[in-house]
Image (cartoon, rainbow, N blue to C red):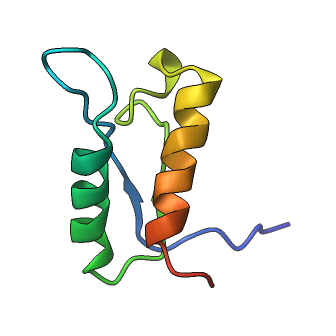
């Protein structure tokens, strides 16, 4: 059984503020906006590129919210 998942999926990084170690919402949005200028089939949050194992649930919820604000619905 195929799940239909395929095409170009981009692993999005999670930028942090150097001085505080906190997630940088501004830089996350800038990065995601740049990717969305290209023909993609999807984005991947929280993989090893996105520091997924180091983020707590609250941080992940915040990042999903930022992404939902920018990614157009299907």
Residue drawn 33% across the image and 37% down it:
14
Q: Position of residue 63 (x, y in %)?
A: 49, 44
Looking at the rendering, in which quadrant would you find the N terminus?
bottom right
Residue drawn 27% across the image and 80% down it:
38
Q: Which is nearer the eye, 67 or 49? A: 67
Looking at the rendering, in which quadrant would you find the C terminus?
bottom right
Q: Which residue lies furthest to the right in this view?
A: 1
Q: Which is nearer the eye, 68 or 51? A: 68
Q: Which is nearer the eye, 11 or 1? A: 11
Image position of 55 with respect to 14: above or below: above
Q: Where is residue 20 in the image (x, y as percent from the top left)?
A: 23, 14
**For this view, does 40 lie left or right of residue 68?**
left
**For this view, does 66 lie left or right of residue 38?**
right
Q: Position of residue 44 (x, y in %)?
A: 48, 52
**For this view, does 36 lie left or right of residue 65?**
left
**For this view, does 59 lie left or right of residue 28?**
right
Total numbered badges shown on the rendered structure: 0
Q: In which quarter of the image is residue 33?
A: bottom left
Image position of 29 with respect to 34: above or below: above
Residue drawn 43% across the image and 70% down it:
70
Q: Position of residue 58 (x, y in %)?
A: 60, 28
Image position of 33 with respect to 24: above or below: below
Image position of 3 with respect to 67: above or below: below
């Amino acid at each position: 059984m195929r799940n239909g998942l395929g095409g170009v999926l981009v692993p999005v990084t999670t930028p942090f503020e150097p001085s505080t170690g906190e997630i940088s919402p501004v830089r996350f949005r800038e990065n995601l906006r740049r990717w969305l200028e290209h023909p993609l089939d999807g984005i991947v949050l929280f993989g090893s590129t996105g520091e997924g194992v180091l983020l707590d649930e609250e941080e992940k919820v915040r990042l999903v919210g930022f992404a939902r604000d920018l990614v157009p619905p299907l």
